[in-house]
Amino acid sequence: MRATHASVASLASLLIQLATAKIHYGIANYANGNKDHATWVDGEDACQYTYIGNAFTNPCDFNDRIFFLPNGTDCQLTGCNDIDISASTLTEVDTTNAWPAKFDDWYNAASGCEDQYGGYYVDQW
């Protein structure tokens, strides 16, 4: 099959989007009091976050742990330290792609969310 200009352009566009994707970090706040460390890709629904760990744990405890984003990207949080978590980076596994973790406060980045554990909303930090 011969690649057309349109298919090459579409692939290039997708690669640019992946290479420039921002990863958001936040807390999913459940109605039952449970809280999760959450991450999601910019432009995606924060209700569909990737679970990193329980939010009652320091997020730096998950430094270098691999987690999987809904878009299929394998990432890990690197460079996290207890003094300045905002210095951490989300790095795509097995590549050189890295994104600074986005730590802009945005309360209710997603609300009205529901999963098997109940209703929740997501705050971005």
Image: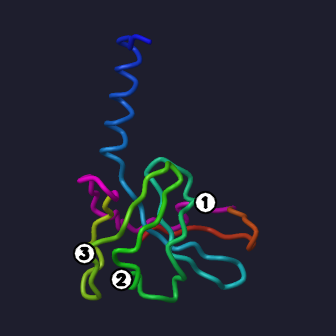
In the image, 93: left or right of 27? left
- 62 lies above or below 56: above
Q: Residue 52, percent across and down?
A: 49, 73
Give the number of callouts. Answer: 3
Residues at discs 1 and 2 in contact (Cβ within 8 Å): no
- Identify the element where label 1 is drawn: helix
The residue identified by callout 2 is 60
- Colour option used: rainbow
User: Image point 41% across, 61% down: which residue?
Assistant: 24
Of the numbered discs 1 and 2, the one sitting upstream in the chain is 1
- 77 lies above or below 92: below
User: Image point 57% across, 72% down: which residue?
Assistant: 28
| Residue depth check, mark 1 versus mark 2: number of the one nearer the observer | 2
Is 94 included in the stretch rendered in magenta?
A: yes
- Identify the element where label 3 is drawn: loop
Q: Which residues are magenta?
A: 92-112
Is 17 included in the stretch rendered in magenta?
A: no
Q: CA distance from mark 1 to mark 3?
A: 26 Å
The residue identified by callout 3 is 79
User: Image point 53% across, 64% down: which residue?
Assistant: 50
The residue identified by callout 1 is 47
In the image, 89: left or right of 3? left
Q: Residue 5, percent across and down?
A: 35, 12
- 9 lies above or below 36: above
- Identify the element where label 2 is drawn: helix
Q: Residue 68, percent across and down?
A: 48, 60
